[in-house]
Image: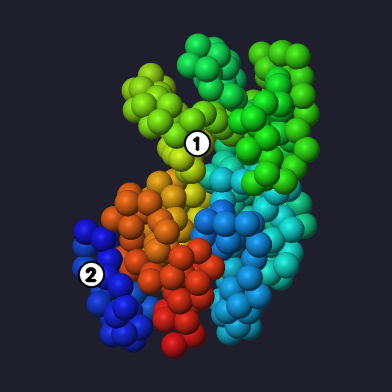
Amino acid sequence: MGGGVGVDPAEHRERLLVHGGEKPVSRPKLIAVDLDDTLLEADLTLLDETAAALAEAKARGVKLVLATGRMFRSALPYARRLGIDGYLITYNGALVRSVDGETFWHKPVPAHHARALVDFARRADLRLNLYLDDTLVVDEVDERVEYYLTIAQVEPEVVDDLMQALERGEPTKCLLVGEPGQVAELLPRMQAAFPDLQISRSKPRFIEVTRRGIRKDVALAAVAERFGIRMEDVMAVGDGDNDAAMLAGAGIGVAVANASAKAKEAAAYVAAGARGAGVVEAVRRFVLA
């Protein structure tokens, strides 16, 4: 069941249980936060109040980790502003890399699956983004790509043939972009057609595709272990369907008010505030209280 709203932080922290109710969750030692529509406002800005709350948590010794579907290069400026000196979970967990460029792991989409996705996108009239060596590769810049670029704020590499581009290597992630209704219809069909891939919806127009078993929660567990921190001592904050497993797997999973129904259902706590306000609320309630 989904979590409650507006509960006293100390009381609520004691009531949040993990692993079937074995023991109460302690004060978080690591905070993992999604970027778009969670940490960032609708206009992609990071509010000073949001940054300040996370800075205070960091000053108290809490580790900060960004967990996003974005490219590494697209997420890095926000990590630097927050003073993160550890790892970024990017591409929905397919690439974990430190701010200084050390790759912790890279789990790309197998080449034969990527080629099949190129064919599927063409037949379904979806725009396909490939991510090769942290570069966005497309075969055309249309409205769908422009929409993506307004969010990611990166420059694409435009090629004549995506199949030929795949000869350079396996893509870290594939992203299919369509209209919301089209995406809603095609998502279950894709999940049935590609059982060996991890397929989820992040934004209404985005279908995210990674290697099977690669999700934010899987990468977060590996990063937490690297820091010597148990998942029971992690707080994760997110909004999208692709955040749901991360929220469910963390000691305290928080969905911001604007989160999807799936994310709210997975969360232990649903914030009253949307986006950055929800992040601030979670940090104040469960970390700084």
Residue kind at label 1, given as amino acid type? Arg
- Please provide percent x and percent y for residue 137: 71, 28
Residue 45 visible in this rendered orientation of the protein: yes
Structural crowding at the residue carrying mark 2, measured as other residues with C-alpha within 10 Å and reported as few (<14), some (14–19) or many (≥20): few
Q: Residue at position x 64%, y 66% from top?
A: 46
- Please provide percent x and percent y for residue 27: 42, 80
- Please provide percent x and percent y for residue 24: 28, 76
Is 49 left, or right, of 159 in this rendering? left
Q: Residue at position x 61%, y 77% from top?
A: 49
Q: State the CA–CA distance, disc 1 to disc 2.
A: 39 Å
Residue 270 in the image: above or below residue 131 = below
Residue 116 in the image: above or below residue 34 = above
- Please provide percent x and percent y for residue 93: 54, 46
* SS state under label 2: loop
Q: Quadrant of the C terminus?
A: bottom left
Residue kind at label 2, given as amino acid type? Glu
Is 231 left, or right, of 153 in this rendering? left
Structural crowding at the residue carrying mark 1, measured as other residues with C-alpha within 10 Å and reported as few (<14), some (14–19) or many (≥20): many
Q: Residue at position x 58%, y 61% from top?
A: 41
Kindly identify which residue carries mark 1: 205
Residue 266 visible in this rendered orientation of the protein: no
Which numbered disc covers residue 181? none
Q: Quadrant of the N terminus?
A: bottom left
Kindly identify which residue carries mark 2: 22
Q: Nearer the viewer, residue 111 or 160?
A: 160
N-terminal label among 1 and 2: 2
Quadrant housing residue 14: bottom left
Q: Residue at position x 63%, y 38% from top?
A: 147
Quadrant housing residue 197: top left
